[in-house]
Amino acid sequence: MNLEKVVFGFFVLLAATLNFGYVTGDIGNPDLHNVAELYAAVVVNVVATILKFGDRTQIGAMHLATSLVATIQLIGAATVWIWITQIQPQALTASAMSSVVSLALGALLANIVSVVLMVIETANFRHH
């Protein structure tokens, strides 16, 4: 068993599941979207991105691209949340919450592509 592949797969799947957990629920209801889960998704996506650096294969480049997209989308979502709640202190409206969740949904799409790539790569792996 390749420990590096296990760690990589762990972070790719954890990034996707945290992201999925965050976006699940009514898009405009702040009570259904935990800010700690959003921040956990950001951190895990950053770690997954770091793990993808150095792979010089074509599929490695696609993994990195999907991870960069997810991380940028999640950082955008966190920035909107911080802007609304800390810089312009106000309650999260349905409109503001839907902006945050929409960005996180974009990240989820990128994470799903990353998981699909990982499954394809694993299915094509042959022992030599």
Image (cartoon, grey):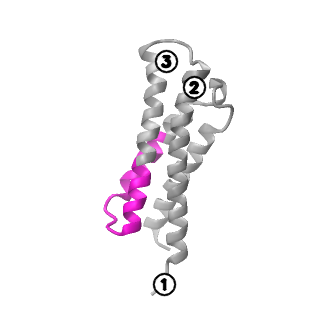
- Amino acid type at circle 3 is Thr
Instruction: Say the numbered circle drawn on residue 85.
Output: 3
Total marks in image:
3
Badge 1 or badge 2: first in the primary sequence: 2
Q: Distance between the residues labelled 3 and 1?
A: 52 Å
Provide the secondary structure element on which disc 2 rests: helix
Position of residue 95 measured from the top left corner of the image (x, y, whole percent) = 58, 22
Provide the secondary structure element on which disc 1 rests: loop
- Relative side of 102 to 44, left or right: right
Badge 3 or badge 1: first in the primary sequence: 3
Q: What stretch is highlighted in magenta?
A: 42-68
Instruction: Say the numbered circle drawn on residue 127.
Output: 1
- Tell me if residue 5 can be seen: yes
Q: Name the residue under label 2.
A: 97
Provide the secondary structure element on which disc 3 rests: helix
Q: Please tell me in which quadrant of the rendered image residue 43 appears.
A: top left
How crowded pointer 2 is (Cα within 10 Å; few <14, some 14-19, many 20+) is rated as: many
Mark 3 or 2: in front is: 2
Q: CB of mark 3 within 8 Å of CB of mark 1?
A: no
- Amino acid type at circle 1 is His
Q: Which residue is drawn at 50% across and 50% down?
A: 110
Position of residue 100 measured from the top left corner of the image (x, y, whole percent) = 53, 30
Position of residue 104 measured from the top left corner of the image (x, y, whole percent) = 53, 38
In this view, 83 is above or below 20: above
How crowded pointer 3 is (Cα within 10 Å; few <14, some 14-19, many 20+) is rated as: few
Mark 1 or 2: in front is: 2
How crowded pointer 1 is (Cα within 10 Å; few <14, some 14-19, many 20+) is rated as: few
Secondary structure mostly seen in magenta is helix
- Tell me if residue 10 can be seen: no
